[in-house]
Amino acid sequence: MDNRLGIPLPYLDTDWTSYEKETQQTILLEWEKIRGKIPDRIKELESSINIKQAQLNDESNFDRSCQLNTEISELASIINDLWLWYRMNQHLSHDKIHS
């Protein structure tokens, strides 16, 4: 489980080709389940960003404004990383499942 991203990430302790086909299929199917949850996770984070932006619009304390901007930046960074995971493995999963 990657606590920052809020999803489990694949971890392979050996080279992909060393796994038997059945094991590869199991891994890929599990990844597809996880991958399918990424858009929902992104929506959650976008919702948090919207809340923080609304707070920022009404914030007059400079220090608090800086803190909110930092939090928004971190959430946006997490969203970016989630999209990278989502897209990076899309072609791999599709190619491997159908081979």
Image (cartoon, rainbow, N blue to C red):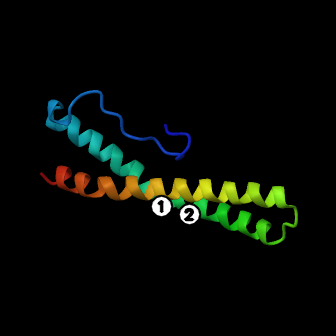
- Amino acid identity at mark 1: Pro
Q: Residue at 60% of width from left, 53% of height from top?
A: 74
* Left or right: 41, with 91 as reference point: right
Name the residue at 36% across, 39% down: 10
**Marking on residue 43:** 2
Residue 24 on image: x %, y %: 21, 39
Image x and y of residue 91, in percent: 24, 57
Would residue 41 be visible to someone looking at this image? no
User: Residue 54, relative to residue 76: is it above or below?
Assistant: below
* Pick the front one: 26 or 15: 15
The amino acid type, in three-letter code, at marker 2 is Lys
- In whole angstroms, how far apart are the C-alphas of marks 1 and 2? 6 Å
| Residue at the extreme left | 99
User: What is the total number of numbered labels drawn onto the structure image?
Assistant: 2
Name the residue at 16% across, 30% down: 18
Give how far across and how far down residue 52 sits, in percent: 73, 63
Q: Residue furthest right?
A: 60
Mark 1 Cα within 10 Å, few/some/many (few <14, many 20+)?
Answer: some
Whether residue 56 sits left or right of residue 7 in the image: it is right
CB under 8 Å between discs 1 and 2:
yes
* Callout 1 secondary element: helix
- What residue would you read off at disc 1? 39
For mark 2, give the secondary structure.
helix
The reply to whether residue 2 is visible in this rendering is yes
Front-most of 59 and 9? 59
Q: State the mark number for residue 68.
A: none
What residue do we see at 79% from left, 72% from top? Answer: 57
| Residue furthest out toward the front | 62
Residue 14 position in % (x across, y down): 24, 28
Disc 2 residue crowd, few under 14, some 14–19, many 20+, Cα 10 Å: few
